[in-house]
Image (cartoon, helix red, strand yellow):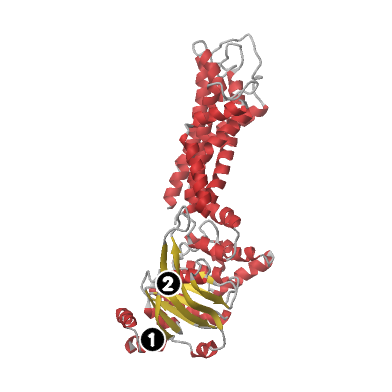
Amino acid sequence: MTDIKSTLTSITGIGANPAAQAKAQDHLVLEVNHVSGGYHTPGLFGRGKYQQVLYDVDFNIRHGEIMGLVGESGTGKSTLARMILGMVKPEEGSIVHHTKRPQIIFQDPYSSLNPAYTVEWSLEEPLRVFGKYDEAERKRRVRDMLAKVELPEECLYARPSELSGGQRQRVSIAAALIRRPRFIIADEPVSALDVTIQAQILQLLRDLREELDLSYLFISHDLNVVYQLCDRVLVMKEGRIVEQGTVDEVYDHPKEEYTKQLLAAAQ
Amino acid sequence: MKKRKWNGYLIAGAIITTIIVVWILVGRFYTPYPPTKMSSARLQGPSLAHLFGTDKFGRDIFSRVMQGSGTTLMIAALTILIGAGIGTIVGSITGYFGGIADEVLMRFNDALTAFPSILLALVIISILGSGKHNVIIALGIVFIPSYARMMRTAFAAQREVNYITSARLMGASSARILMVHMLPNTIHVLLPALTIGFNNAVLAEASMSFLGIGVTPPDVSMGYMLSEAQGMFRSAPWYALSVGGVIALLVFGVSLIGEGIQRMNKEVD
């Protein structure tokens, strides 16, 4: 694993951020306390069949930290994300947010923007719904955020279908951040993008963390991407967190057999 | 993605429909002869003085069709407004929320669909009585189920899409999500359906009035004139032909528009 680590660091020039780790001890943005839960398949009468997905998931995310969540597809990573966002209720345990308005960035930049509207509309809509700003202030904030995600102003008047995948993902990030949340869930945000675009978006996410004082839960099945970006990592298998720790600990000295397999597969 | 481009169907349909609709609208204010004025020039064939000829009372058929089509056009437009409007509301609620409301409304919908539409209209007319306004209500109700079913699918398809999830997360109200976030994305389904529905409404009004359960005098409509023309088909065949011709042209023009929109959507996809 050391080979990968050193190669990646030399290629990308980015590794875990020590400053953020030191600051991270300050306070928590999210507590997930022994959460179990899943889905009820809808039935005409009653709640239908119950399918448990998560088993005793327990972790915290600290201020300024990027927490990676890795595991194969179908292990419940996205269910956990939905639960943290309040879209699915946990059966047991509790989820405590210490920040307001958590937002999500989705994997598929093609379905995360409303095709019927321009980029400007999509960015302004969260502010309109919020209802605290007048139109001039909304427009100012939209342009401000567009600059932060490094898109030219022409993009404002484009529809999503006229943008590239990378541009759409930048717009999605802007839309998620426009109301200045402090905690973001990024659900495989670069998996649908080309490798060069991936690196740009990852760099953008890092820059925005510094600039806007963000914390992330970064979901991915790509261990290399997680290594580049994250401070700590959760390894999930069949709905359970089987290992967690700093990226260096987990990647250099994996304790669990499953983590070793994942790391071996990534190499 | 390609830009939406007008195609031949759309252009031809728009031209035909515009000409007829303008002609009909002019008929609201001006006709060459008063449509009900009788004269001694009975049963005359088409000529420069009477473009569509005259009927057995010496009335100018051109003027009558010009005015009568207006009634049909208005009935069809209002019918579609009611049918598509209520259908969209029902479809959006059932499609987005699902659950019990969906089950109940859609079973009710199935029950309405199970009736042949003319029979259902007949039942409603026999309760309400005939006349222009009741025809609109009856046909409007008849048209609700098909729109409800179609719009339900269009809304349900967006329910779990990411941009709707985002809208929910930002705290947008359900009404806002349905009307502002989802409705514009159903337009490509709704528009062709409106054109088809409009045509069906024109034909349904014509059949009802032809059967004598539609509009009542002094209102005249296409169907009413058709049944009138049937009585003098041998002596004045140009009457039935001109009424039928205008109906056919109107329906043809609107169909072309619908086809054009569908082809345009396909190109974009």
Give me the chain letter of mark 2.
A
- The residue nearer to you, when weighing A63 against B265, is A63
Q: Quadrant of the C terminus of chain A?
A: bottom left
Q: Amino acid at mark 2?
A: Leu
Q: Residues within 10 Å of mark 1 (few under 14, many from 20)?
A: many
Q: Give the residue drawn at x 45%, y 84%.
A: A232
Single out the residue that lies furthest toward the top.
Answer: B40
| Residue B59 drawn at (x, y percent) | 61, 15
| Residue B259 drawn at (x, y percent) | 45, 40
Picture quarter containing residue B171? bottom right
Q: Give the residue drawn at x 51%, y 25%.
A: B207
Q: Is there any visible trace of residue B251 in the rendered image?
A: yes
- The residue nearer to you, when weighing A147 against A44, is A44
Q: Give the residue drawn at x 50%, y 58%.
A: A115
Q: Give the residue drawn at x 34%, y 89%.
A: A2
**What residue is shown with label 2?**
A54
Q: Could you tell me if the residues under marks 2 and 1 are in contact, i.e. CB atoms within 8 Å?
A: no
Picture quarter containing residue B66? top right
**B199 is higher (above) or lower (below) than A170:** above
**What residue is shown with label 1?**
A250
CA distance separating discs 2 and 1: 22 Å
Q: Amino acid at mark 1?
A: Val
Q: Is there any visible trace of residue B249 in the rendered image?
A: no
SS for tag 2? strand
Give me the chain letter of mark 1.
A
